[in-house]
Image (tube, rainbow, N blue to C red):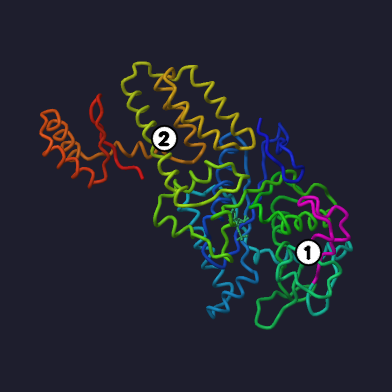
Amino acid sequence: MLSLYNSLTRREEPPFDPDQNNVRLFVCGPTVYDYLHIGNARTYIFFDFFAKLLRARGYDVNYLQNITDIDDKIIKRAGEEHIEPSKLAERFTEAYFEDMKALGVTAVSEYANATDFIAQIVAQVTRLIDRGFAYKIDGDGWYFDIAKDESYGKLSGRTVAQAEDGVSRIDEAVNKRNKGDFCLWKFSVEGEPSWPSTIGAGRPGWHIEDTAISEFYFGPQYEIHGGGVDLKFPHHEAEIAQQESASGLVPFVRTWMHVGALTVDGKKMSKSVGNFVTIRDFLAEHPAIVLRWIVLSHHYRSPLDYSERAVAQAVSEIENLYNLSLQAREEKKNDPQNSIRGDALPWKEKFDAALDDDLNTPKAISIIFEMLKDKQLTAHSKFALMDSFDELLGMNIVQILGQTDAISEKDLKKFEEYKAHRANKQFIQSDALRKELEGLGYVIKDSAEGSTITKKFL
Ligand code: AMP
């Protein structure tokens, strides 16, 4: 049975009831003011894998993501470019969708733009005002009073007094009751986007869009909320405070999942530090599978240090796996035993157990290698296992193997000539043909058993 580390209870536990089939999953989407970097991609690739794994296991997963399309950063960047903030947000929302598609991140069921939920946001702030959790600062906005919420700080383990270090620009105000109070609704400022409302013309604070959107789709309580670990405080703490105070229902979310940071030389990859590689720049150099491999070959909660060496290691591991799969496929062709036998089951159980244990993907990957090297396992079982594990991890290596069948007649003929020259020890001719085939994107391997030709993988 699946057990996940819950950041709220700080232990591993089942993320939902055993008889439950519907899973509601919310993951914080991006603020669309620029192209995303591969640190952001780590979080989205991981949750893509997670949602698809649950679906493969028969769960009906409703995976919701908000898009922050109104925010200080968007307003600032739009001002620099002399365009409307909404136009800038539209441009980078499109870019985000393109990047996710290119990465094979396709599991999200619904995307929701913050600006499409202004009515729900205003309604939630109004409930917080009516229930005594929010107060007004004239000429500024509506703020959440964290001292009114007795359980504030339960996710991050901070007290009201310690809550000040996560204050972002929109939350800065001199007249706040507590330093950690955060803005729910910012009154309109000349030249900035604003929406008319019963609580005054203005725009949403940073945290309120997520709870207004999730309440609209999921109701006041749901199973799983995820994001990068940087969002645990103040963002997720604020979400809990808002939703539990607005509804009076606890817990808002049963399981909180946090993905560790992608770092460079130990520092979190971020726009503000400038140590980032955009998804686009990464994909211009490497196939998407390389990033997926880097992400899944590390445990999702650990920090992951990105470097050229990490890329080279991923490429070499993928190639190893590809070659072992290729070997299994070839063995399968010559194996008269053409059905999967009971010998596959223990491997399947081992693989599933690794994932059940807080999604231990690095262990699951090492099990695939062990399985492919198991001399007792029949080729059919090996290949079938590889096919299913590969699909669960979303690597598509087996699919790529399928494509290697598509070697043209003409090139196959050249390969036959190559083999004939080698057999006759005509190495000048065989070397020339090898070079020509390699130039056409093939890999030729010679061994005691003979020569093989495959399409180059990476
Ligand atoms: P943002 O647009 O900054 O809200 O980021 C979008 C998502 O990417 C959030 O879930 C962040 O937690 C996550 N994220 C940002 N930087 C990193 C990083 N260096 N490593 C992993 N996840 C990150």
Tell me if label 2 and label 1 are in contact, CB under 8 Å: no
Residue behind label 1 places its C-beta within 8 angstroms of ligand 1 = no
Neighbourhood count class around disc 2 (C-alpha, 10 Å): few under 14, some 14–19, many 20 upward = some
Quick one: 36 or 160, which is closer to the camera? Answer: 160
Distance Cα–Cα, label 2 vs label 1 = 48 Å
Amino acid type of the residue tagged 1 in the rendering: Glu
Q: Nearer the viewer, mark 2 or mark 1?
A: 1
Q: Residue at x 86, y 69 (%)?
A: 177
Residue 110, compared with residue 403, is above or below; it is: below
Quadrant of the rendered structure where residue 423 is?
top left
Quick one: 72 or 324, which is closer to the camera? Answer: 324
Magenta span dominant secondary structure: loop
- The quadrant of the rendering that contains the N terminus is top right
Disc 1 marks which residue?
164
Classify mark 2: helix, strand or loop.
helix
Q: Is residue 375 rendered to the left or right of residue 176? A: left
> Which residue of the protein is positioned furthest toward the bottom in this rendering?
190
Classify mark 1: helix, strand or loop.
helix
Residue interval drawn in magenta:
142-163
- The quadrant of the rendering that contains the C terminus is top left
Quadrant of the rendered structure where residue 65 is?
bottom right
Disc 2 marks which residue?
321
Earlier sequence position, callout 2 versus callout 1: 1
Amino acid type of the residue tagged 2 in the rendering: Leu
The image position of residue 306, as x and y in percent, is 51, 51
Neighbourhood count class around disc 1 (C-alpha, 10 Å): few under 14, some 14–19, many 20 upward = some
Question: How many numbered circles are shown?
Answer: 2
